[in-house]
Image (tube, helix red, strand yellow):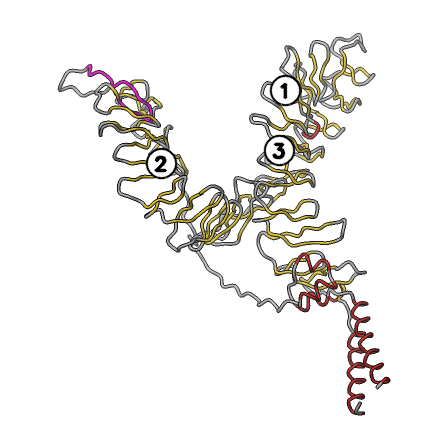
Amino acid sequence: MAPYTAYSLICLGFLLLVFCFDVKAETSEDCKGREKLCSRGMAGEGFCYNEDESDCCGGRVFAKTAGSGCCVNVWNMTARVYSHERQFCCNGTVYSSGSLDCCADVVFNTSTQVCCQGKIQKFTKGAMCCGTELKMEGQVCCSPQHQPRYAKVYNMPKENFICCGNGYINRTEYYCDFATYQPMKICSNNSVHKCCGNEAYDPRKATCCNKKVFHGKSEHWETGDGYVINHICCGGVPQSVNEEICCELRVHNRTATSQCCGTESIDTDEKVCCNGRPFKKHSKYKTKCCSDRGYYEDGEHLCCGEHEARRSVLYNVSTSDNTAKCCNTALFNSTESICCGGEVMKKMKKEDDSCCQVHTRYQTYNSKYYLCEKQGLVAKASHRQQCGRGRTIDTRGQLCCRGMIHPKPSSAIKCCGTKTFNSSNPQLLCQFGSLVKRPPRQLQQGQPNYRQRCGRHMFDTRRELCCRGVKYAKKSDAMKCCGTRLYNSSDPELTCQFGIRLQQMPKMLPMTTTTTTTTPRPEPCPPYIENKFNSILISSGSQGKLAACSTLPVQLCKMICYQMFLTLLWKFLVE
């Protein structure tokens, strides 16, 4: 080997060794300002990140996005980033959303099962949870105050039996003293006194709590047996119902606007409670909940899956963007995709506006030119019309009445609700989807007819109003119908929209747009680095070379460089 080549190799190896031993992992002391340390499990070592722009999951930093979470498996010490809109985390494992959900770290099928206080039960129509059991129709559910997990189910109601906590007692033999029941026995010669454990007490002046007597002033609160007291039990201690509030066995001071939110007490004038988590109200905008997160109706947020309160997802998107739509908990662009059976599906053609289910598959189509039938798409003809999902009719000989198909022998046959009737019959009249007999003409010709039909009854148009089949007394000309209810049309703060009585909305503030810049994401690390050295990165993916490579154990990096230096030195000595 030429001398200059050997010296070059030695110098290169020496530089590698110096560089590797100079590798220093960041600690919390290196993080500045709004930065935090994303620990990778070593002694105080990790990677600094800005919590406004990024999140930390299992020692890895990733860009902060709406609807993302970190799923940590404490058994094998791994973590994985997942999307709330398509996935959920259960016992450290990420699953695809749909018909599955998590119940006390166990996955269950929501279409055939139900989760009752952490215990999975077989779904039964008409049943409801009672503690960890299912309560069927006709049964009784007795639940202790603030402890629904310990509720119990009892069979058919019995005469003189009442719930006492989670017990079902005969009130002729036992008395209930705030979820504790005892046999009616004499522990005092005074008929006013009751038993509390082995001690007699006057319920007008004291409270029995956890088999202990607490004495206090008596006022304002009446019990079932006519006594007036002002204390009840909360977590084994007496609570004044006038001055305190009990939130999941914790006592807090009470105000006129107090409300429980989990174990905390909140002021409803200042905060709202979102699934047990308090959220501060805004002075201008209405505050709403999306799962356990609060948000303001400022036109910059969209909550998807509002009917699935526990799994709904909040997105930072302008509501003025008409292309942004929800599909269950997922957000999608309606110009490119469509929501089919609760799943987002890419449009086959740009003009498609509907989807058709054939067996277990969905297909997008343009409803202007096609109809969806059980066997698939059918080209639209002038006499073909959709009637419910997967069914069409021939309008020349059939009628579709609210999804029900009927024969149409003549043009006089019309729909009335889901049924048909002969409109040429002068004795029949269709009102609000129901067939009624037409009222007889009782007044002479030339006189106004003030008697009109209102549902199945008659009403006088001079003194009464008929609102969609419901009759009201007309107290003034300002009273108008709004759906099935009345409202005062002279009140400037009230309006009727689509049959719903509403308060007039305040004028909206002009929308302001802000320009945001996104920092380009660095090039990811080579996959062989992640797979070989970091099991956390394998499940999560990498965000950049610096993030991934800095999460390699320092000792491992030093060992690799040291081996490279020894290899070069050995090659030089041998040759």
* Disc 2 element: loop
* Disc 1 element: strand
Front position among marks 3 and 2: 2
Query: Mark 3 touching mark 1, by CB under 8 A?
Result: no
Q: Residue at x 68, y 69 (%)?
A: 546
Residue 530, how many percent across, how many down? 70, 64
Horizontal side, residue 272 vs residue 545: left or right: left
Name the amino acid type tagged 1. Answer: Val
Name the amino acid type tagged 3. Answer: Val
Horizontal side, residue 520 vs residue 391: left or right: right
Answer with the quarter of the image where residue 395 lies.
Answer: top left
Q: Which residue is mark 2?
A: 387
Horizontal side, residue 481 vs residue 446: left or right: right
Q: How many circles with numbers are drawn on the protein?
A: 3
Which of these two is toward me, 374 or 123?
374
Answer with the quarter of the image where residue 109 lies.
Answer: top right
Which region shows up in magenta?
A: 429-442
**Which mark, by number, is residue 114?**
3
Answer with the quarter of the image where residue 91 lies.
Answer: top right
Q: Which quadrant is the C terminus positioned in?
A: bottom right
Residue 399, how many percent across, how many down? 30, 32
- Considering every residue shown, the one lying at the far right of the view is 573
Figure check: 167 above or below 319: above
Q: Residue at x 64, y 64 (%)?
A: 543
Which of these two is toward me, 273 or 15?
15
Q: CA distance from mark 1 to mark 2?
A: 43 Å
